[in-house]
C-alpha cells in the first residue's frame, strides 16, 4: 500500500488499553487534519466512533500474531517514529518504506500493576506491555519531532497546545511529555522487577515527588490498592506534603453539609466559609485571609463551573480539590499546567489514625463525632441568638481540625481570625485577634477554643475586643471563676461536651 502525505496531512498513531475520551481525542485531532493509524481493538473503536482509521496490519503487510502479543514491533513503524525529519538522508530512507509519517504517538500501557495483585500469575504476566513500552520510548527519544501522549489527562493539554500553534506542538511541550514518559516507563519496568522479586508491598506503593523536604525520598502505600494518581486530573507530580494537606483539608471539609470552602496551609485551615452557593463560599473564605491563602490548597464540597474556575485562576493556589469539575471549568483550570486538580467525590471517614514514633506505631480511634447544637451547653445566664449559635457550631467544626492550641473567631459562618499551633492559649488568641483586625471589620463575632481557658485572662481579653459569645471545653479548676466572669460581664459562655485537641 502506497501512502502519500499531503502538505496539510498529518498522522497520529493511537493504541490504547483504556479507551476513555477517545472520541474527544479523535474529534479534536481531526480538526487539525490528523489522520489515524491504529491497531486491532483501538482501530475498531475509532471506526465505530465514526472516524477513518488506517489499520497497522494493512500498512505493514504483517498481521498480528500470538493473540496480539506481536503487532507493533515492525521496522516500518519504528522508521516512521524514529527518523529525523530534518535529515535529508533519513527522509530519503524513510520514503522507501511507503508508510505514514507519524507526528503524534498516543499509547497507554496495559495495567500491569492492577493485575499484579491477582493470584493468577499468567494473567499478570500477560499484562506486561512490550509493544506499548517500546513505542513510548522510541517516540520520546525522538521528541524533537514526535509528540508522546501516555495519559488520558494529557489529551486536553495536547489539544490546547495544538490550538495555540496552528495544529503543531512546541518543542518544550514535546520534551516535557518525553520526560514524563521516561519516568512512567522506568517505573513500569521497576514494578515488573519487584513483582518477579515477590516484593508485594512495593506493588501497593506509589513513589512521590519528595518528602517533607526535597532531599527526603517518599512514597505512599495506596489505600484499597487505588493510587492517588487515579484522583489527579492535572498538575505536577504530587508530593508528601501535598497529600497531608489534602487529607487535612478533606477531613475538615466533610464536617460541613452546606456549600463550604476550606483553604489549607501547612495542614491547618487558614480560611473557611460556608454560603448559599460554592462561588460565594470560596470568595468569602479568600477574603477572610487572602495573605495566608496565597499558594494554599483549596477544597470545596460542590462542583466547580466555568465562572468559578475563572475566578480561581486569577489567584495562585497549589492544589484544587472538588467532587466534580464541569468540562468548561476543567479546560480553564488546566491552562495552569502546574495546578494540581484532584477530583474527590466521596471517601469514607477513617476509623483509626496512625502515627509513627520512636517507641512504635501509635493507634487511636478517629474523632468522627458530629458537631451540632447539642454539642454545647450554656453555663452563663445570657443566651446567644440562633445565628450566633450557628456560628459557634461552624467554628467548632473548624477548631476540631486546627493544631492545638487553637482559637477560632468567626462571623456569619466565615472565619475572621485563626490562631493555632501555639505553646500557650493566650498567644493563639492574640494571633487570632490580630488577624481579625488586619483582615476583617466584623463587630459581632464568636470565639471558640479547642481547650479550656485556664485563667480569666483569655476571656478578659475577648471582652476588651468586644467578643460576647464564647465556647470552650469544661475541665479547668478555674471553671467556676470563668463562669462568674462571664455572668458578671454579660458574656454568653458555652461549654462543649468534648475537648478538641489536635497535636
Image (cartoon, rainbow, N blue to C red):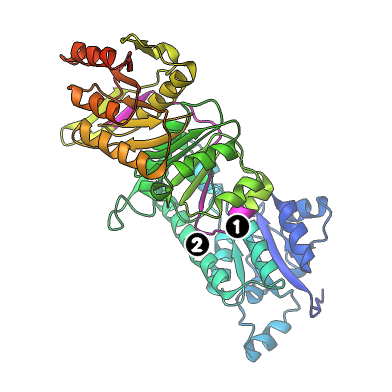
Whether residues under marks 2 and 1 lie with C-beta atoms below 8 angstroms apart, the answer is yes
* 211 sits to left or right of 30: left
- Which corner quadrant holds the N terminus? bottom right
Q: Is residue 45 visible?
A: yes
Return the mark for residue 180.
Answer: 2
**Quadrant assignment, res 156:** bottom right
Q: CA distance from mark 2 to mark 1?
A: 11 Å
Front label number (2 vs 1) = 1
Q: Secondary structure at mark 2?
A: helix
In this rendering, the answer to whether 363 lies above or below 132 is above
Secondary-structure class at tag 1 = helix
Residue drawn at point x = 74 percent, y = 64 percent: 37
* Residue name at image x 61 percent, y 46 percent: 308
Task: For residue 41, say whether it is visible.
Answer: no
Residue 169 appears left or right of 196? right
Which residue is disc 1 drawn over?
154
What is the residue that sits farthest to the bottom in this orientation?
Answer: 88
* Residue sitting nearer the eye, 432 or 143: 432
Earlier sequence position, callout 2 versus callout 1: 1
Q: Report the magenta residues as a range.
A: 332-354
Q: Quadrant of residue 140?
A: bottom right
Residue 288, relative to residue 84: is it above or below? above
For residue 178, the mark is: none
Name the residue: 15% across, 32% down.
359
Residue 419 x/y as whole percent = 30, 37
Amino acid at each position: 500500500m502506497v501512502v502519500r502525505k499531503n502538505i496539510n496531512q498529518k498522522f497520529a498513531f493511537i493504541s490504547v488499553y483504556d479507551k476513555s475520551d477517545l472520541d474527544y481525542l479523535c474529534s479534536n485531532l481531526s480538526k487539525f487534519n490528523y489522520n489515524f493509524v491504529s491497531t486491532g481493538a483501538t482501530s475498531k473503536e475509532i471506526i465505530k466512533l465514526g472516524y477513518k482509521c488506517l489499520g497497522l496490519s494493512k500498512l505493514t503487510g504483517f498481521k498480528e500474531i500470538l493473540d496480539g502479543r506481536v503487532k507493533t514491533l515492525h521496522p516500518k513503524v519504528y522508521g516512521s517514529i524514529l527518523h529525523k525529519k530534518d535529515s535529508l538522508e533519513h527522509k530519503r530512507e524513510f520514503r522507501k518504506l511507503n508508510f505514514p509519517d507519524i507526528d503524534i504517538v498516543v499509547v497507554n500501557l496495559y495495567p500491569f500493576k492492577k493485575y499484579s495483585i491477582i493470584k493468577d500469575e499468567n494473567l499478570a504476566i500477560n499484562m506486561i506491555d512490550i509493544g506499548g513500552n517500546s513505542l513510548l520510548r522510541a517516540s520520546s527519544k525522538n521528541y524533537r519531532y514526535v509528540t508522546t501522549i501516555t495519559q488520558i489527562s494529557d489529551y486536553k493539554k495536547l489539544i490546547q497546545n495544538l490550538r495555540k500553534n496552528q495544529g503543531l506542538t512546541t518543542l518544550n511541550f514535546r520534551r516535557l511529555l518525553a520526560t514524563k514518559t521516561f519516568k512512567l516507563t522506568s517505573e513500569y519496568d521497576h514494578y515488573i522487577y519487584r513483582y518477579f522479586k515477590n516484593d508485594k508491598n512495593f506493588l501497593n506503593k506509589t513513589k512521590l515527588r519528595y518528602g517533607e523536604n526535597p532531599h527526603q525520598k517518599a512514597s505512599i502505600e495506596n489505600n484499597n490498592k487505588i493510587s492517588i494518581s487515579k484522583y489527579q486530573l492535572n498538575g505536577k507530580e504530587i508530593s508528601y506534603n501535598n497529600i497531608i494537606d489534602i487529607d487535612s483539608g478533606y477531613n475538615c471539609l466533610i464536617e460541613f453539609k452546606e456549600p463550604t470552602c476550606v483553604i489549607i496551609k501547612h495542614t491547618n485551615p487558614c480560611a473557611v466559609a460556608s454560603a448559599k452557593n460554592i462561588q460565594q463560599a470560596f470568595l468569602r473564605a479568600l477574603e477572610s485571609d487572602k495573605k495566608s491563602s496565597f499558594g494554599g490548597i483549596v477544597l470545596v464540597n460542590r462542583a466547580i463551573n466555568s465562572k468559578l474556575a475563572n475566578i480561581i485562576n486569577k489567584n495562585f493556589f497549589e492544589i484544587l480539590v472538588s467532587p466534580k469539575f464541569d468540562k468548561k471549568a476543567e479546560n480553564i483550570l488546566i491552562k495552569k499546567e502546574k495546578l494540581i486538580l484532584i477530583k474527590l467525590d466521596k471517601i469514607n471517614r477513617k476509623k483509626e489514625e496512625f502515627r509513627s514514633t520512636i517507641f512504635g506505631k501509635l493507634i487511636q480511634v478517629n474523632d468522627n463525632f458530629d458537631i451540632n447544637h447539642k454539642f454545647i451547653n450554656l453555663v452563663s445566664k445570657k443566651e446567644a441568638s440562633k445565628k450566633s449559635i450557628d456560628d459557634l457550631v461552624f467554628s467548632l467544626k473548624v477548631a476540631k481540625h486546627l493544631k492545638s492550641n487553637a482559637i477560632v473567631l468567626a462571623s456569619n459562618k466565615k472565619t475572621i481570625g485563626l490562631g493555632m499551633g501555639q505553646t500557650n492559649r493566650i498567644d493563639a488568641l492574640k494571633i487570632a485577634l490580630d488577624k481579625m483586625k488586619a483582615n476583617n471589620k466584623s463587630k459581632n463575632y464568636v470565639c471558640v477554643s479547642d481547650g479550656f481557658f485556664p485563667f480569666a485572662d483569655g476571656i478578659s481579653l475577648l471582652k476588651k475586643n468586644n467578643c460576647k459569645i464564647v465556647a470552650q471545653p469544661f475541665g479547668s479548676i478555674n471553671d467556676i471563676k470563668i463562669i462568674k466572669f462571664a455572668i458578671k460581664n454579660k458574656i454568653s459562655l458555652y461549654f462543649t461536651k468534648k475537648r478538641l485537641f489536635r497535636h
